[in-house]
Image (cartoon, rainbow, N blue to C red):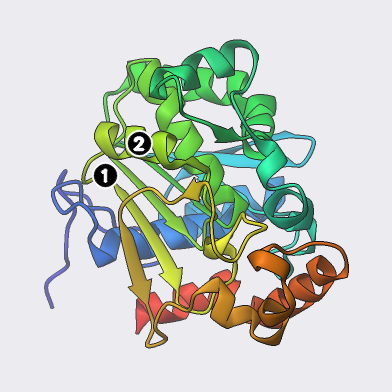
């Protein structure tokens, strides 16, 4: 029986996963990066062993407050995987940054991070919660990525699930500002990170390099928003649907709650009702669901 090999002649990772830099957006790449996104939820000792055993990567954990990322490397690839919220089985920790304070958090970040993001254009606005999260971990993580690139030039892959997917997009932009090319960004169930102008800037800079995987009934990719009829947030390209469920609009997902919203705006007790409805669909956001669909 022949053994499938990667471009540099090495065998696939021990778990059978592989990355192919010549096939952007391939199913093999998505499966590998989805597994890396799952391992990103693990603590230090367990995660280091799992990255090696399943993906063949020598991995290091970077963690500041609630932001966590793993940097995994081998002779052929550099992989950065961001964790989502602390628990992969709930979205409760995302309520404020995805719904309650959504529009108030659409800003131009301050400091060095704001300077780098300002390159997206004068009208580009970004989600403050996501920007603050990446800012906590970025100095140490970016220095480590830069050192790996200087040591051996290899493709840089960035991935993450849920909040981790949003941070993966920010990381790609910030690495490009350091003149470090990003080969591919692959996210799973990620929310929107900025407004139309910000998304258009990402589309220009990373044409054909961003692949957003979503489950049709996953509520998180439909957020942040407080309005059912208008939303200043917008997704970057390009979207890939997994599973057989068609993409459900937020207004359809919320059903009777949406019918009570004055002028389509969720406010007061409706916010809590909306969040309860979204939580009822949380199983569609679990990373295991994405892994199952990609394997199928």
Q: In x, y percent, where is residue 6?
A: 19, 53
Which of the 4 quarters of the picture holds residue 247?
Answer: bottom left
Q: Are marks 2 and 1 in contact (CB under 8 Å)?
A: no
Nearest the viewer among 72 and 206 is 206
| Image position, residue 174 (x, y; %) | 45, 24
Cα–Cα span, label 2 and label 1: 10 Å
Q: Residues within 10 Å of mark 2 (few under 14, many from 20)?
A: many
Residue at point 43%, 51% (across, down): 235
Q: Which mark is residue 274?
A: none
Q: Which residue is mark 1?
A: 209
* Quadrant occupied by the N terminus: bottom left
Residue placed furthest toward the right: 269
Give me the residue at 65% from left, 28% from top.
Answer: 137
Residue 76 on image: x %, y %: 27, 39
Residue drawn at x 69%, y 62% as measured from the top left: 265
Q: Which numbered circle lies on residue 202?
A: 2
Give residue 248's position: percent from left, percent from top: 48, 79
Name the residue nearer the viewer: 212 or 161: 212
Q: Quadrant of residue 141?
A: top right
Q: What kind of element bears circle 2?
A: helix
Q: Is residue 112 above or below residue 79?
A: above
Estimate how packed mark 1 is, as few (under 14), some (14 to 19) or many (20 or more) residues with alpha carbons within 10 Å.
Answer: some
The quadrant the C terminus occupies is bottom left
Q: Is residue 81 left or right of residue 238?
A: right
């Amino acid at each position: 029986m022949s053994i499938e090999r990667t471009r540099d002649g090495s065998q696939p990772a021990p778990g059978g996963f592989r990355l192919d830099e010549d096939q952007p957006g391939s199913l093999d790449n998505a499966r590998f990066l989805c597994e890396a996104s799952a391992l990103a939820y693990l603590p230090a000792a367990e995660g280091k062993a799992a990255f090696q055993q399943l993906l063949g990567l020598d991995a290091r954990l970077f963690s500041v407050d609630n932001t966590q990322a793993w940097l995994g490397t081998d002779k052929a690839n550099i992989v950065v995987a961001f964790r989502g919220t602390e628990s992969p089985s709930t979205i409760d920790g995302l309520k404020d940054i995805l719904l309650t304070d959504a529009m108030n958090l659409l800003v131009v970040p301050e400091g060095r991070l704001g300077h780098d993001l300002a390159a997206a254009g004068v009208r580009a606005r970004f989600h403050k919660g996501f920007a603050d999260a990446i800012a906590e971990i970025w100095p140490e993580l970016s220095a480590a990525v830069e050192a790996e690139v200087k040591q051996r030039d290899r493709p840089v892959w960035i991935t993450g699930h849920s909040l981790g997917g949003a941070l993966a997009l920010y990381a790609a932009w910030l690495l490009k500002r350091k003149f470090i090319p990003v080969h591919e960004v692959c996210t799973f169930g990620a929310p929107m990170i900025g407004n139309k102008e910000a998304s258009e800037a990402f589309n220009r800079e990373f044409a054909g390099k961003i692949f957003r995987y979503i489950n049709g009934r996953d509520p998180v990719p439909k957020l942040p928003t407080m309005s059912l009829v208008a939303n200043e947030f917008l997704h970057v390209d390009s979207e890939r649907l997994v599973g057989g469920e068609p993409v459900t609009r937020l207004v359809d997902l919320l059903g009777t709650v949406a019918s009570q919203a004055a002028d389509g705006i969720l406010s007061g007790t409706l916010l809590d009702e909306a969040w309860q409805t979204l939580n009822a669909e949380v199983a569609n956001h679990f990373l295991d669901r994405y892994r199952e669909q990609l394997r199928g």
